[in-house]
Image: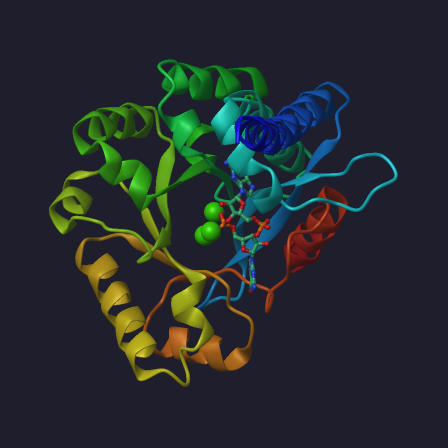
Amino acid sequence: AKQGGKRRYVFYANEMSKDALQFLRMDAALRRALERREFHLVYQPQVNIASGRIIGFEALLRWQPPGEAVIAPDQFIGLAEETGLIVQIGEWVLETACRQLVAWQRAGLCPQDIKMSVNLSATQFRQDDMVATVQRVLATTQCPPHCLVLEITESVIMDSPESTVQILNALSAFGVQLAIDDFGTGYSSLSYLKRFPIHTLKIDRSFIRDISIDGNDAEIVKAVIALAHAMNRNIVAEGVEDSVQLDFLRDHGCDQAQGYFFGKGIAPEEAAALLSRQQLP
Ligand code: C2E
Ligand code: CA
Ligand code: CA
Ligand code: CA
């Protein structure tokens, strides 16, 4: 029995170390990736539904280890959040996206009202120096603050609404815009929404997907559009994949859309080409 117990222990220890090893290996790989510049951003267009024009881009993170396929953020953001490495990765994302927008502006491709949206994770948002970091990146890249939109989720906001309102007010005070990402999937208190300097609600793709076949989803989307407008907020529909969805959104007064129907995340050169075609008279 004694030996059996010992064997069980060894087995357990092996299991633990396998997970821990995997975790450490992934963390090391991500740190290396940051040093060796294996990350890049793709830019997904956001469109004004009424005019059909591009009004901004969302920067989306990609990891391409040498000689391997591109890895999507869902595969590594969670771990980077746990280890805290997301703070450094996120700062790189913010700086790269702002720098890109300024490059387009300087090339005359990008009217001053085109916005760059950047995702902020919960860990990033809770850093003591987060507001200072955003301010510093805006200064070093010379990105106009009103061109930057920071996307945060409802859970980040509702996690600690009292401290969040101060952070959001500070960001908003120097002109940065704020968007709630994946709106409708979390829990938002309407009274907080009203008090917070939120410019945009991004209605989650899960409500858009079946908009034309699921009556409940259609009603939810209509209600969210009405809610956003009643509060004088901008509304973006995420994950628009076909013209039926777009027609529904247009008919119900949704302001902006983003999704594969308009295009997936693209390389900076492709985004620049899109912008320059839009510049044509
Ligand atoms: P998200 O912020 O909700 O971004 C939208 C995701 O939906 C993107 O996936 C985008 O490629 C995808 N998408 C856009 N349009 C469509 C569509 O029409 N149909 C479908 N099926 N999907 C569509 P991606 O790039 O894999 O990013 C996944 C998530 O990873 C993002 O969700 C965001 O939460 C996170 N993420 C991406 N980049 C960053 C980053 O730089 N920092 C942080 N903290 N998180 C990031
Ligand atoms: Ca987002
Ligand atoms: Ca989203
Ligand atoms: Ca999402």
Above or below: residue 218 compared with residue 237: below
Q: Nearer the viewer, residue 181 or 274?
A: 181
Is residue 197 visible in the rendered image? The answer is no
Is residue 195 visible in the rendered image? The answer is yes
Q: Nearer the viewer, residue 124 or 114?
A: 124
**Residue 6, x across and y down, in percent:** 57, 26
Kindly identify the residue that appears in the image at 23 percent across and 69 percent down.
223
**Residue 184, x across and y down, in percent:** 30, 58
Q: Residue furthest right?
A: 67
Q: Residue furthest left?
A: 191
Kindly identify the residue that appears in the image at 63 percent across and 47 percent down.
43
Q: Nearer the viewer, residue 255 or 265?
A: 265
| Quadrant in the rendering for residue 35 | top right
**Residue 95, x across and y down, in percent:** 58, 25
Kindly identify the residue that appears in the image at 73 percent across and 21 percent down.
32
Kindly identify the residue that appears in the image at 67 percent across and 27 percent down.
30
- Horizontal arrangement in the rendering, residue 136 relative to residue 183 (left or right): right
